[in-house]
Amino acid sequence: MKDLKRIEIIDLLQGKANDQIGSEICVKGWVRTKRGNKNIAFVALNDGTIVHNIQVVVELSNFDQELVKKITTGASLRVNGKLVESVGQGQNVEVQATEIELYGEADPETYPLQKKGHTLEFLREIAHLRPRTNTFGAIFRIRHAMAFAVHKFYNDKRFFYWHSPLITVSDAEGAGEMFQVTTLDLDNIPRTENGKIDYSQDFYGRETSLTVSGQLEGELGALSLGKIYTFGPTFRAENSNTPRHLSEFWMIEPEMAFYELEDNMNLAEEFIKYLVSYALENCKDDLEFLQSMYDKELIERLNHVVDTDFIRLKYTDAITILEASQQKFEYPVSWGVDLQSEHERYLVEKHFMKPVILIDYPKEIKAFYMKENTDGKTVRAMDVLFPKIGEIIGGSQREDNMDKLVARMKEVGIEPKDMKWYLDTRRFGSVPHSGFGLGFERLLLFVTGMVNIRDVIPFPRTPKNAEF
Protein backbone atom coordinates (compact mmCIF):
# COMPACT_ATOMS: atom_id res chain seq x y z
CA MET A 1 0.00 0.00 0.00
CA LYS A 2 1.05 3.57 -0.58
CA ASP A 3 2.45 5.21 2.54
CA LEU A 4 -0.08 8.02 3.02
CA LYS A 5 -0.50 10.07 6.19
CA ARG A 6 -3.69 9.15 8.02
CA ILE A 7 -6.46 11.74 8.30
CA GLU A 8 -8.84 11.42 11.25
CA ILE A 9 -12.49 11.05 10.33
CA ILE A 10 -13.56 14.07 12.38
CA ASP A 11 -11.41 16.27 10.15
CA LEU A 12 -13.00 14.82 7.03
CA LEU A 13 -16.56 15.29 8.26
CA GLN A 14 -16.03 18.76 9.72
CA GLY A 15 -14.50 20.11 6.52
CA LYS A 16 -10.93 20.49 7.79
CA ALA A 17 -9.59 18.42 4.89
CA ASN A 18 -11.67 19.96 2.09
CA ASP A 19 -8.49 21.16 0.43
CA GLN A 20 -7.73 17.50 -0.24
CA ILE A 21 -10.91 16.74 -2.20
CA GLY A 22 -9.79 14.95 -5.35
CA SER A 23 -6.61 13.72 -3.67
CA GLU A 24 -5.76 10.25 -2.40
CA ILE A 25 -5.92 10.01 1.38
CA CYS A 26 -5.65 7.39 4.13
CA VAL A 27 -8.29 6.63 6.78
CA LYS A 28 -8.26 3.98 9.47
CA GLY A 29 -11.00 2.67 11.73
CA TRP A 30 -13.52 0.00 12.61
CA VAL A 31 -16.35 -1.12 10.37
CA ARG A 32 -19.76 -0.12 11.68
CA THR A 33 -21.79 -1.53 8.76
CA LYS A 34 -21.36 -2.87 5.23
CA ARG A 35 -24.13 -2.82 2.65
CA GLY A 36 -24.38 -2.87 -1.14
CA ASN A 37 -24.89 -5.21 -4.06
CA LYS A 38 -22.86 -7.57 -6.25
CA ASN A 39 -20.94 -4.69 -7.81
CA ILE A 40 -20.33 -2.21 -5.03
CA ALA A 41 -20.10 -2.10 -1.23
CA PHE A 42 -20.62 0.85 1.08
CA VAL A 43 -18.58 0.55 4.25
CA ALA A 44 -19.30 2.85 7.22
CA LEU A 45 -15.98 3.42 8.96
CA ASN A 46 -15.53 4.99 12.41
CA ASP A 47 -12.27 5.79 14.23
CA GLY A 48 -13.73 7.06 17.53
CA THR A 49 -13.05 10.74 16.91
CA ILE A 50 -16.70 11.58 16.12
CA VAL A 51 -20.07 9.90 16.39
CA HIS A 52 -20.57 9.98 12.61
CA ASN A 53 -19.01 7.53 10.14
CA ILE A 54 -17.19 8.17 6.88
CA GLN A 55 -18.58 6.23 3.94
CA VAL A 56 -16.02 4.17 2.03
CA VAL A 57 -17.13 3.16 -1.46
CA VAL A 58 -15.65 -0.16 -2.56
CA GLU A 59 -15.81 -1.20 -6.24
CA LEU A 60 -15.85 -4.96 -5.70
CA SER A 61 -14.22 -5.78 -9.04
CA ASN A 62 -11.07 -3.99 -7.90
CA PHE A 63 -10.53 -6.10 -4.77
CA ASP A 64 -9.91 -9.71 -3.82
CA GLN A 65 -13.25 -11.27 -2.92
CA GLU A 66 -11.82 -13.10 0.09
CA LEU A 67 -10.73 -9.75 1.51
CA VAL A 68 -14.15 -8.23 0.88
CA LYS A 69 -15.85 -11.11 2.73
CA LYS A 70 -13.76 -10.36 5.80
CA ILE A 71 -14.91 -6.74 5.89
CA THR A 72 -17.62 -7.25 8.51
CA THR A 73 -18.95 -5.22 11.42
CA GLY A 74 -16.20 -4.82 14.00
CA ALA A 75 -13.30 -5.49 11.63
CA SER A 76 -10.52 -2.90 11.52
CA LEU A 77 -9.23 -1.43 8.27
CA ARG A 78 -6.69 0.83 6.70
CA VAL A 79 -8.11 2.40 3.55
CA ASN A 80 -6.33 4.43 0.91
CA GLY A 81 -8.69 6.15 -1.47
CA LYS A 82 -9.77 9.26 -3.28
CA LEU A 83 -11.65 11.87 -1.22
CA VAL A 84 -14.67 13.01 -3.23
CA GLU A 85 -17.80 15.04 -2.65
CA SER A 86 -20.70 12.77 -1.73
CA VAL A 87 -23.93 12.60 -3.67
CA GLY A 88 -25.69 10.89 -0.75
CA GLN A 89 -27.63 12.63 1.99
CA GLY A 90 -26.16 13.30 5.44
CA GLN A 91 -22.53 13.63 4.41
CA ASN A 92 -20.43 16.02 2.37
CA VAL A 93 -17.56 13.72 1.44
CA GLU A 94 -16.80 10.05 1.03
CA VAL A 95 -13.79 7.92 0.18
CA GLN A 96 -13.53 5.89 -3.02
CA ALA A 97 -11.27 3.03 -1.97
CA THR A 98 -8.20 2.18 -4.04
CA GLU A 99 -6.37 0.02 -1.49
CA ILE A 100 -7.61 -1.78 1.63
CA GLU A 101 -5.60 -3.48 4.37
CA LEU A 102 -7.43 -5.65 6.89
CA TYR A 103 -5.87 -5.01 10.30
CA GLY A 104 -8.10 -7.32 12.32
CA GLU A 105 -11.09 -9.54 11.61
CA ALA A 106 -14.28 -9.74 13.69
CA ASP A 107 -16.06 -13.06 13.31
CA PRO A 108 -19.74 -12.32 12.56
CA GLU A 109 -20.75 -15.43 14.48
CA THR A 110 -19.12 -14.36 17.75
CA TYR A 111 -18.66 -10.55 17.66
CA PRO A 112 -21.27 -9.39 20.21
CA LEU A 113 -21.92 -6.03 18.51
CA GLN A 114 -22.78 -7.54 15.15
CA LYS A 115 -26.40 -6.43 15.36
CA LYS A 116 -27.95 -3.10 16.28
CA GLY A 117 -30.43 -2.42 19.08
CA HIS A 118 -28.61 -3.92 22.05
CA THR A 119 -29.99 -2.89 25.43
CA LEU A 120 -27.90 -0.81 27.81
CA GLU A 121 -28.17 -3.70 30.29
CA PHE A 122 -26.57 -6.09 27.80
CA LEU A 123 -23.82 -3.60 26.96
CA ARG A 124 -22.89 -3.32 30.65
CA GLU A 125 -22.01 -7.01 30.49
CA ILE A 126 -19.45 -6.28 27.76
CA ALA A 127 -18.04 -3.04 29.12
CA HIS A 128 -14.74 -3.75 27.36
CA LEU A 129 -16.44 -3.48 23.95
CA ARG A 130 -19.29 -1.03 24.53
CA PRO A 131 -17.16 2.08 23.74
CA ARG A 132 -17.33 0.91 20.10
CA THR A 133 -21.04 1.66 20.01
CA ASN A 134 -22.28 5.10 19.00
CA THR A 135 -23.90 5.59 22.40
CA PHE A 136 -20.85 4.94 24.51
CA GLY A 137 -18.47 6.59 22.10
CA ALA A 138 -20.56 9.74 22.55
CA ILE A 139 -20.73 9.38 26.34
CA PHE A 140 -17.00 8.89 26.80
CA ARG A 141 -16.08 11.75 24.47
CA ILE A 142 -18.34 13.97 26.58
CA ARG A 143 -16.73 12.58 29.74
CA HIS A 144 -13.33 13.63 28.40
CA ALA A 145 -14.60 17.09 27.49
CA MET A 146 -16.07 17.60 30.96
CA ALA A 147 -12.83 16.51 32.65
CA PHE A 148 -10.86 18.94 30.50
CA ALA A 149 -13.36 21.71 31.28
CA VAL A 150 -12.99 21.10 35.04
CA HIS A 151 -9.26 21.68 34.87
CA LYS A 152 -9.61 24.68 32.57
CA PHE A 153 -12.21 26.36 34.79
CA TYR A 154 -10.09 26.13 37.93
CA ASN A 155 -6.79 26.87 36.23
CA ASP A 156 -8.25 30.05 34.74
CA LYS A 157 -9.39 31.08 38.24
CA ARG A 158 -5.91 30.52 39.75
CA PHE A 159 -6.84 27.42 41.70
CA PHE A 160 -4.12 24.85 42.29
CA TYR A 161 -4.69 21.19 41.45
CA TRP A 162 -4.22 19.38 44.77
CA HIS A 163 -3.52 15.66 44.90
CA SER A 164 -5.19 14.34 48.03
CA PRO A 165 -4.32 10.78 49.12
CA LEU A 166 -6.35 7.74 48.11
CA ILE A 167 -5.20 5.83 51.19
CA THR A 168 -6.32 7.52 54.39
CA VAL A 169 -6.95 7.05 58.10
CA SER A 170 -9.88 9.51 58.24
CA ASP A 171 -13.54 9.02 57.38
CA ALA A 172 -14.51 12.46 56.13
CA GLU A 173 -18.20 11.62 55.81
CA GLY A 174 -18.52 9.79 59.12
CA ALA A 175 -20.49 7.02 57.42
CA GLY A 176 -18.03 4.23 58.16
CA GLU A 177 -18.59 2.61 54.75
CA MET A 178 -14.96 2.40 53.66
CA PHE A 179 -12.82 -0.19 51.86
CA GLN A 180 -10.01 -1.37 54.09
CA VAL A 181 -6.43 -1.37 52.81
CA THR A 182 -4.20 -4.07 54.29
CA THR A 183 -1.28 -6.38 53.57
CA LEU A 184 -2.02 -8.63 56.55
CA ASP A 185 -2.25 -12.35 55.87
CA LEU A 186 -6.01 -12.90 55.87
CA ASP A 187 -5.47 -16.60 56.64
CA ASN A 188 -3.44 -15.76 59.71
CA ILE A 189 -4.52 -12.35 61.00
CA PRO A 190 -2.40 -11.14 63.94
CA ARG A 191 -4.35 -10.38 67.11
CA THR A 192 -3.69 -8.38 70.26
CA GLU A 193 -4.10 -9.89 73.73
CA ASN A 194 -7.73 -8.82 73.83
CA GLY A 195 -8.46 -10.43 70.46
CA LYS A 196 -8.57 -7.34 68.26
CA ILE A 197 -6.72 -7.13 64.95
CA ASP A 198 -3.15 -6.00 65.55
CA TYR A 199 -2.78 -3.27 62.95
CA SER A 200 0.67 -2.39 64.27
CA GLN A 201 1.89 -5.28 62.11
CA ASP A 202 0.14 -3.94 59.01
CA PHE A 203 1.94 -2.06 56.22
CA TYR A 204 1.20 1.42 57.63
CA GLY A 205 1.23 0.35 61.26
CA ARG A 206 -2.40 1.35 61.70
CA GLU A 207 -5.83 0.76 60.18
CA THR A 208 -6.15 2.42 56.75
CA SER A 209 -8.85 2.66 54.10
CA LEU A 210 -9.57 3.97 50.62
CA THR A 211 -10.78 7.55 50.77
CA VAL A 212 -14.43 8.59 50.52
CA SER A 213 -13.43 12.24 50.00
CA GLY A 214 -10.38 14.40 49.54
CA GLN A 215 -12.00 17.27 51.40
CA LEU A 216 -10.20 17.23 54.73
CA GLU A 217 -6.79 17.05 53.06
CA GLY A 218 -8.04 19.65 50.57
CA GLU A 219 -8.68 22.06 53.43
CA LEU A 220 -5.01 21.75 54.36
CA GLY A 221 -4.07 22.90 50.88
CA ALA A 222 -6.54 25.78 50.83
CA LEU A 223 -5.31 27.04 54.18
CA SER A 224 -1.83 27.33 52.73
CA LEU A 225 -2.27 28.07 49.02
CA GLY A 226 -5.58 29.94 49.14
CA LYS A 227 -7.62 28.05 46.52
CA ILE A 228 -7.23 24.41 45.53
CA TYR A 229 -9.30 21.70 43.89
CA THR A 230 -9.06 17.93 43.94
CA PHE A 231 -10.25 15.74 41.08
CA GLY A 232 -9.82 12.02 41.51
CA PRO A 233 -11.38 8.68 42.39
CA THR A 234 -13.16 8.10 45.69
CA PHE A 235 -14.55 4.89 47.14
CA ARG A 236 -17.54 3.90 49.21
CA ALA A 237 -18.32 0.39 50.46
CA GLU A 238 -22.06 0.98 50.48
CA ASN A 239 -24.07 -2.07 49.49
CA SER A 240 -26.38 -0.14 47.18
CA ASN A 241 -27.44 -1.62 43.86
CA THR A 242 -29.25 1.42 42.49
CA PRO A 243 -29.01 3.50 39.28
CA ARG A 244 -27.46 6.32 41.36
CA HIS A 245 -24.66 4.55 43.23
CA LEU A 246 -21.16 3.33 42.44
CA SER A 247 -18.54 2.01 44.82
CA GLU A 248 -15.77 3.74 42.83
CA PHE A 249 -16.53 7.20 41.46
CA TRP A 250 -14.80 10.50 40.74
CA MET A 251 -15.17 13.69 42.76
CA ILE A 252 -14.26 17.32 42.15
CA GLU A 253 -13.73 19.12 45.45
CA PRO A 254 -12.63 22.78 45.54
CA GLU A 255 -11.65 24.33 48.86
CA MET A 256 -11.20 28.09 49.24
CA ALA A 257 -9.70 30.19 52.01
CA PHE A 258 -11.55 33.44 52.81
CA TYR A 259 -14.76 32.19 51.13
CA GLU A 260 -17.99 32.33 53.11
CA LEU A 261 -21.27 30.63 52.24
CA GLU A 262 -22.36 33.26 49.70
CA ASP A 263 -19.01 33.02 47.89
CA ASN A 264 -19.32 29.24 47.89
CA MET A 265 -22.77 29.34 46.31
CA ASN A 266 -21.63 31.80 43.66
CA LEU A 267 -18.70 29.62 42.70
CA ALA A 268 -20.80 26.44 42.55
CA GLU A 269 -23.39 28.05 40.27
CA GLU A 270 -20.73 29.56 38.01
CA PHE A 271 -18.82 26.27 37.87
CA ILE A 272 -21.70 24.06 36.87
CA LYS A 273 -22.98 26.58 34.30
CA TYR A 274 -19.49 26.70 32.82
CA LEU A 275 -19.38 22.92 32.47
CA VAL A 276 -22.80 22.70 30.84
CA SER A 277 -21.96 25.58 28.49
CA TYR A 278 -18.70 23.87 27.56
CA ALA A 279 -20.59 20.70 26.67
CA LEU A 280 -23.09 22.61 24.53
CA GLU A 281 -20.30 24.41 22.68
CA ASN A 282 -17.88 21.50 22.24
CA CYS A 283 -19.96 18.30 22.18
CA LYS A 284 -22.70 19.28 19.75
CA ASP A 285 -22.70 16.14 17.60
CA ASP A 286 -22.61 13.77 20.55
CA LEU A 287 -25.36 15.64 22.44
CA GLU A 288 -27.58 15.68 19.35
CA PHE A 289 -27.09 11.94 18.95
CA LEU A 290 -27.95 11.21 22.60
CA GLN A 291 -30.97 13.49 22.36
CA SER A 292 -32.24 11.68 19.27
CA MET A 293 -31.78 8.27 20.88
CA TYR A 294 -32.55 8.72 24.58
CA ASP A 295 -33.78 12.11 25.79
CA LYS A 296 -35.73 14.38 23.47
CA GLU A 297 -35.49 17.32 25.89
CA LEU A 298 -31.77 17.01 26.65
CA ILE A 299 -30.38 20.09 24.90
CA GLU A 300 -33.35 22.25 25.94
CA ARG A 301 -32.75 21.25 29.57
CA LEU A 302 -29.04 22.01 29.33
CA ASN A 303 -29.72 25.43 27.86
CA HIS A 304 -32.29 26.13 30.57
CA VAL A 305 -29.69 25.54 33.29
CA VAL A 306 -27.21 27.89 31.63
CA ASP A 307 -29.78 30.64 31.14
CA THR A 308 -31.45 30.43 34.57
CA ASP A 309 -30.53 31.99 37.91
CA PHE A 310 -30.58 29.29 40.57
CA ILE A 311 -33.08 29.66 43.41
CA ARG A 312 -31.48 30.03 46.85
CA LEU A 313 -33.67 28.59 49.58
CA LYS A 314 -33.32 27.83 53.27
CA TYR A 315 -33.98 24.26 54.38
CA THR A 316 -36.73 25.44 56.75
CA ASP A 317 -38.57 27.15 53.90
CA ALA A 318 -38.15 24.06 51.74
CA ILE A 319 -39.82 21.92 54.42
CA THR A 320 -42.73 24.37 54.55
CA ILE A 321 -43.15 24.09 50.76
CA LEU A 322 -42.98 20.30 50.79
CA GLU A 323 -45.45 19.98 53.68
CA ALA A 324 -47.90 22.27 51.88
CA SER A 325 -47.52 20.52 48.53
CA GLN A 326 -50.13 17.80 49.19
CA GLN A 327 -47.74 15.54 47.30
CA LYS A 328 -47.68 11.90 48.37
CA PHE A 329 -44.03 11.20 49.09
CA GLU A 330 -42.63 7.76 49.80
CA TYR A 331 -40.65 9.29 52.68
CA PRO A 332 -42.65 11.64 54.98
CA VAL A 333 -41.35 15.18 55.39
CA SER A 334 -40.83 17.10 58.61
CA TRP A 335 -38.24 19.53 59.94
CA GLY A 336 -35.05 17.66 60.76
CA VAL A 337 -35.27 14.88 58.17
CA ASP A 338 -32.61 14.42 55.53
CA LEU A 339 -34.29 15.18 52.21
CA GLN A 340 -34.58 12.34 49.71
CA SER A 341 -34.24 12.56 45.94
CA GLU A 342 -38.03 12.69 45.54
CA HIS A 343 -38.21 15.80 47.74
CA GLU A 344 -35.31 17.49 45.97
CA ARG A 345 -36.75 16.79 42.53
CA TYR A 346 -40.18 18.09 43.56
CA LEU A 347 -38.64 21.42 44.52
CA VAL A 348 -36.66 21.64 41.28
CA GLU A 349 -39.01 20.11 38.73
CA LYS A 350 -42.47 20.99 39.99
CA HIS A 351 -42.34 23.90 42.41
CA PHE A 352 -39.62 26.21 41.09
CA MET A 353 -38.92 24.54 37.72
CA LYS A 354 -35.28 25.57 37.94
CA PRO A 355 -32.16 24.50 39.89
CA VAL A 356 -32.21 25.18 43.64
CA ILE A 357 -29.41 25.82 46.12
CA LEU A 358 -30.66 24.66 49.51
CA ILE A 359 -28.88 26.12 52.56
CA ASP A 360 -28.91 26.15 56.38
CA TYR A 361 -29.62 22.48 57.12
CA PRO A 362 -30.14 21.09 60.64
CA LYS A 363 -26.71 20.38 62.08
CA GLU A 364 -27.78 16.92 63.28
CA ILE A 365 -28.00 15.60 59.71
CA LYS A 366 -24.79 17.18 58.44
CA ALA A 367 -21.08 16.48 58.87
CA PHE A 368 -19.07 17.66 61.87
CA TYR A 369 -16.94 20.15 59.91
CA MET A 370 -19.79 22.45 58.81
CA LYS A 371 -19.94 25.91 60.39
CA GLU A 372 -22.70 26.39 62.94
CA ASN A 373 -25.16 29.24 62.49
CA THR A 374 -25.95 31.60 65.35
CA ASP A 375 -29.29 29.84 65.98
CA GLY A 376 -27.35 26.81 67.30
CA LYS A 377 -29.61 24.46 65.32
CA THR A 378 -28.46 24.80 61.73
CA VAL A 379 -25.19 24.86 59.81
CA ARG A 380 -24.01 26.78 56.76
CA ALA A 381 -24.44 23.85 54.43
CA MET A 382 -25.47 24.08 50.79
CA ASP A 383 -26.73 21.50 48.31
CA VAL A 384 -27.27 22.25 44.63
CA LEU A 385 -30.34 20.41 43.34
CA PHE A 386 -30.85 19.64 39.65
CA PRO A 387 -33.70 18.30 37.53
CA LYS A 388 -33.73 14.52 37.03
CA ILE A 389 -30.80 14.17 39.46
CA GLY A 390 -31.62 15.74 42.81
CA GLU A 391 -28.45 16.69 44.69
CA ILE A 392 -25.53 17.22 42.33
CA ILE A 393 -23.29 19.36 44.59
CA GLY A 394 -22.90 19.26 48.35
CA GLY A 395 -20.82 21.68 50.36
CA SER A 396 -20.61 24.17 53.19
CA GLN A 397 -18.71 26.89 54.91
CA ARG A 398 -16.30 25.00 57.16
CA GLU A 399 -16.17 25.49 60.92
CA ASP A 400 -13.13 27.70 61.58
CA ASN A 401 -13.65 28.10 65.34
CA MET A 402 -11.41 25.66 67.18
CA ASP A 403 -13.59 25.23 70.27
CA LYS A 404 -16.81 24.71 68.32
CA LEU A 405 -15.14 22.22 65.99
CA VAL A 406 -13.74 20.17 68.88
CA ALA A 407 -17.10 20.20 70.65
CA ARG A 408 -18.88 19.01 67.52
CA MET A 409 -16.32 16.25 66.95
CA LYS A 410 -16.93 14.96 70.45
CA GLU A 411 -20.70 15.05 69.87
CA VAL A 412 -20.39 12.74 66.86
CA GLY A 413 -17.82 10.44 68.47
CA ILE A 414 -14.63 11.62 66.77
CA GLU A 415 -11.61 11.66 69.05
CA PRO A 416 -9.93 15.10 68.62
CA LYS A 417 -6.45 13.75 69.35
CA ASP A 418 -6.74 11.50 66.29
CA MET A 419 -7.38 14.58 64.14
CA LYS A 420 -4.58 16.81 65.46
CA TRP A 421 -3.30 17.42 61.93
CA TYR A 422 -6.74 18.74 60.92
CA LEU A 423 -7.23 20.82 64.05
CA ASP A 424 -3.83 22.49 63.57
CA THR A 425 -5.33 24.49 60.71
CA ARG A 426 -7.74 26.05 63.25
CA ARG A 427 -5.08 26.29 65.93
CA PHE A 428 -2.63 28.26 63.78
CA GLY A 429 -3.94 31.10 61.63
CA SER A 430 -7.53 29.95 61.14
CA VAL A 431 -9.60 31.81 58.54
CA PRO A 432 -13.15 31.57 57.16
CA HIS A 433 -13.13 28.99 54.39
CA SER A 434 -15.56 26.96 52.31
CA GLY A 435 -15.77 24.19 49.77
CA PHE A 436 -18.00 21.71 48.02
CA GLY A 437 -17.98 18.40 46.17
CA LEU A 438 -19.37 17.63 42.73
CA GLY A 439 -19.84 13.98 41.85
CA PHE A 440 -18.43 13.73 38.33
CA GLU A 441 -20.71 10.86 37.33
CA ARG A 442 -23.78 12.71 38.64
CA LEU A 443 -22.78 15.62 36.39
CA LEU A 444 -22.41 13.27 33.45
CA LEU A 445 -25.86 11.79 34.04
CA PHE A 446 -27.30 15.27 33.67
CA VAL A 447 -25.21 16.27 30.66
CA THR A 448 -25.74 13.04 28.70
CA GLY A 449 -29.36 12.35 29.62
CA MET A 450 -28.53 8.84 30.80
CA VAL A 451 -30.51 7.47 33.74
CA ASN A 452 -28.12 4.84 35.13
CA ILE A 453 -24.82 5.96 36.61
CA ARG A 454 -23.17 2.74 35.40
CA ASP A 455 -23.48 4.06 31.85
CA VAL A 456 -21.31 7.16 32.30
CA ILE A 457 -18.13 5.51 33.62
CA PRO A 458 -16.04 3.10 31.53
CA PHE A 459 -15.85 0.29 34.08
CA PRO A 460 -18.55 0.54 36.76
CA ARG A 461 -17.71 -0.85 40.19
CA THR A 462 -20.78 -2.00 42.09
CA PRO A 463 -21.51 -4.73 44.65
CA LYS A 464 -20.53 -8.16 43.24
CA ASN A 465 -19.20 -6.53 40.05
CA ALA A 466 -15.49 -6.00 39.41
CA GLU A 467 -15.00 -8.11 36.31
CA PHE A 468 -12.80 -5.81 34.24
Image (spheres, rainbow, N blue to C red):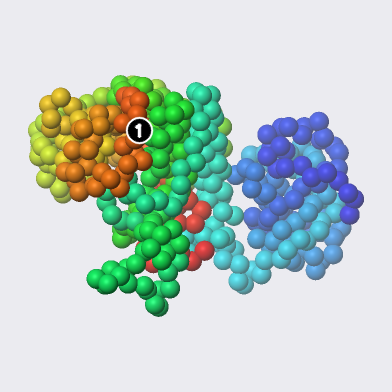
Percent position of residue 333, x then y: 12, 41
Residue nearest the observer in this picture, 68 or 399? 399
Tell me if 289 is positioned left or right of 317 in this view.
Answer: right
Residue nearest the observer in this picture, 371 or 315? 371
Tell me if 444 is positioned left or right of 43 in this view.
Answer: left
Amino acid type of the residue that numbered disc 1 sits on in the rendered structure: Thr
Image: 1 above or below 54: below
Residue nearest the observer in this picture, 25 or 305? 305
Percent position of residue 279, x then y: 51, 33
Image: 78 above or below 324: below
Image: 464 above or below 288: below
Image point 26% across, 24% down: which residue?
312
Image point 76% across, 37% down: which residue?
85
Q: Which residue is mark 1?
A: 425
Image point 71% across, 47% down: which residue?
55
- Res 452 visible: no
Percent position of residue 421, x then y: 36, 41
Percent position of residue 390, x then y: 29, 40
Answer with the quarter of the image where residue 368 lies.
Answer: top left
On-image quarter of the N terminus: bottom right
